[in-house]
Every structure is written in structure tokens, then in C-alpha cells.
Image (cartoon, grey):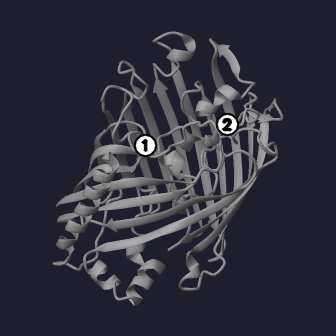
Amino acid sequence: MHYRKAVFFAVAGLLASSGYALADNSPKTSLSLDPTVITADAAADKTPLMGLLDKAGAAKPLEDAGLSIYGWVEAGYTYNHRHHGNEGPIAPGPFNHEVGNHFMLNQVTLRFEKLVDTKKFDVGGLVEVTYGTDAGFLHSSGMPFNGNDPTDDGNPSDPIPDKYRANYQFDVSQAYLDVSVGGGLKFRIGKFVTLLGYETVDPRGNLFYSHSWIFNALPFSQTGVLASYDINDKLSVTAGVTRGWDMTFEDNHACQIDFLGNVTYKISDQLVAMVNLNCGPQNFGDTGHYRTVIDPIVTWKVTDQLSLAAEGLYIYDGGLNAEESSTTHAYGDIWGAAVYASYTINDMFTINARVEKYHSYSDSIGALGDISDSLPGFDDSNGGVPTVNVYSFTLGTTITPMPKDPCLKNLSIRPEIRYDVSEDRPFTQHGSSFKDQITFAADVIFKF
């Protein structure tokens, strides 16, 4: 019942807030709490869904109220040269790592959104619902959905938990209210996509169908209160508290809260630097150890065609490996870096590349997460705690087949080839472990 109340109040507040827009039809602007999350494209250009509503005579009242209804569909296929059937999950996952090589309907996402004007008092927010294979991994604690918990399908000869299969589920992936008090100050309360990470769960803003190892070491959503403030045209800050990583109505550490923040500095119109920070208890039943995350990101639009980005990550957690090493003062570190490049050839083709180094001294969080117990070949020299070092190289393209068509310009196809190689042996095939793997993947996204 908790999630129904949360969605009800978020929708009610969003609809009630639309009354503020009736008195002022000026364009709305918004300070994004995460610059990599796309939120304003529906407001900038009428989407196919709003176009259909317009033909039905329903779009104008929504637009007058400042409300937008839009979404997207994502479906894809991943082929891994080491997986031919029930071989176990494909690392790093999670969104395209299910057992075997098969088609997945990843996301059917619908958003109800009202942007706020940070220059004056304004109220808005967003409600986002998602259906598909991704939803099972987006669930936060306390939300009464199936989640990605292992289940027994009754087949004793099948060693793979159902959570690694294409399990179609539903999730309320975001539900929050925004309140602007003017002067560049805005408050956000509810469940929102985490500030951490260059890549997000929203596929529209990512260069690839597959995700980086860094992405999988971070939470997908957090629930709490954030305040964002535009200090000037170049500098903005965000700070607040949340219940923890992927936690909403329940937590695993005695209702302790964590700190979540962001500092963004616009060096120029082409160069932007930011640092995301997170600190607080995240381990089950452990309030004595704080997990600290430092996540710097730099984006650089070199030319109108070439864009570059770089992300670093460092995670420190003194209690991360306590269970594995039988001590309450074990150390668990994750660190890595990724570099991205994107070159636009024309309206139809964009070439994308990603290079990454990832290190994990833990099997509790991160890209291998809870599946590492089933993967042989880890270096257990650190007191039985697995260590993995991975290098990843991804090359792909974004194809917009009909960029001039009013509707089909929203259709994009993203084929990619990826090579992962490790100093350890985290990749499996037929019960054996290997140091590398090759994956071929492609997804289709349609924004409506």
C-alpha cells in the first residue's frame, strides 16, 4: 500500500501544481539535478504522443498547465560468444545480462512531467512508470513488486535463478515533487534517479545499449530530499539526504540516512566539470561503516561534430567485505575510469566509443555483485575476498534512419561490439573460466 500512496500523492501534487502554470505561459526552464538525465525534450518539441493528444483536443489544456506526457520504448538483443544457453548471467549487466542470447523488451516508459521555473515560485514534478525486463532491476526496497530475487522454478536440473532471465515486470521508477522558491533555488522530494554516474537508467542519454562497469557499481535510484541552487550562470550546487542506495520505504541499516551532492561548474559553453558525492551507511545491518563515493565527470564539446566525456569513480567502504573476511573492519574499494567519444557524421549516423578500466575488491556491490559467487577464477589472495580488474572497449553507432520525418525522427538504432578482458578469470563458458569475452548487441529506441 505504501507505493500506491506515494504515487497518489505525487500525481495529486503534480496535477495540483499545474494551476501555477495557468497564470503564466512563458517558457519553463529547469536546473537539472543530473545533467545527464534528459527531462526537457518533451517541452522543447511536441512528441508523437502529445501530437495525438492534440488531434483529440486534449493537448492544449495540458500544455497550458505546463504538463507534458511522453515516453519511450527500448528493445534489444545481446549475443555473447561464451554463452549458448543456460550458462549463467552475462557480466557486467544488469540490463542486458540475462541467461543466453535472446531478445528483450527492456523498457516501456511513460512520464507525466511538469518542469519548474527556478527564477520564481513554481511547483512541478515527475511521475515515471516502467514496464519491461529492466524494471526488475530498478526496484527499490519497500516497493511491493517481485524484484530480482531468486525464485525456484521447480526444475532441479536448472541451476540458474530466474532473476537472470528476461522477467517482465512493472516499476514506479521515479515519483517526486519539485518546488522552486525563486532566485535559482529548487527543492526536490521523492524517489528520483541517482545523481551518481555519467550513464543513467534512461537509455536516451546513453551512447550504448550495454552499460559501463562503473554504472553497475552505483545505485539506480534514491529517495529523499534535495536542494539545488544556481549560484550564478556558471556554478550550481545540489545537496540533500536520502534513505540510501535503491531504498524507498524500507532500508537495511536502521533508518540511517546518507548525504548526496553535486557541484557543477560551466567552464565555458563547450566545457563542463562536475563532482558527485555520496556518503552514508549502505551495508545490511551495519551503521558503523560509511560508504563514500567520489564521482568526477567532465564533458567537452570539442566541435559541432565531436564530443568527449570522462568519468572517474572511487568507492571506499570499511564494512563492505566484513562477512567474507570474518572481520568488522575489512576494507572494500572500487575504482575505475571511463572515457567516451562521440562523432556526428550527419543527421543519420553518429559513431560512439567507450574505453574503461574497472577494479573491484569486493563481491558485495558493483558490476559482478551477487553473481560473483558463481564465477570461478577470482584472485582470492586477499583473505578470500574476490578481486577483479577489467578493461573494456566498446565501439558502436547511433543510426537515425529517417531524421527528417516528423514522427520517425524519434526512432534510433544502436548496434555495438564490445570486448572485455580481465587480469582475472571472471567470464564463464561450459563450467570453465576465461579472461575475456566478446559481445555483439543492438537496441532500438522509439521516443513517443
Whether residue 266 can be seen here: no
State the residue at coordinates (48%, 58%).
130
**Which picture quadrant has residue 9?**
bottom left
Residue 176 at x, y percent in the picture: 31, 55
User: Which marked residue is nearer to the observer: mark 1 or mark 2?
Assistant: 2
Q: Is residue 214 above or below residue 169?
A: above
| Disc number placed over residue 154 in the picture, else none | 2
Q: Which residue position is annotated with label 1?
A: 140
Whether residue 158 can be seen here: yes
Q: Is residue 49 above or below residue 206?
A: below
Q: Say what secondary structure mark 1 lies in.
A: loop
The residue lying furthest to the front in this view is 154
State the residue at coordinates (39%, 20%).
286
Residue 219 at x, y percent in the picture: 47, 41
Q: Is residue 193 above or below residue 245?
A: below
Q: Nearer the viewer, residue 186 or 53?
A: 53
State the residue at coordinates (30%, 30%).
255
Q: Nearer the viewer, residue 227 or 324?
A: 324
Judged left or right of residue 61, residue 51 is right
State the residue at coordinates (33%, 57%).
234
Judged left or right of residue 367, residue 271 is left
Residue 298 at x, y percent in the picture: 49, 50
- Give the amino acid type for the residue marked by disc 1 in the picture: Ser
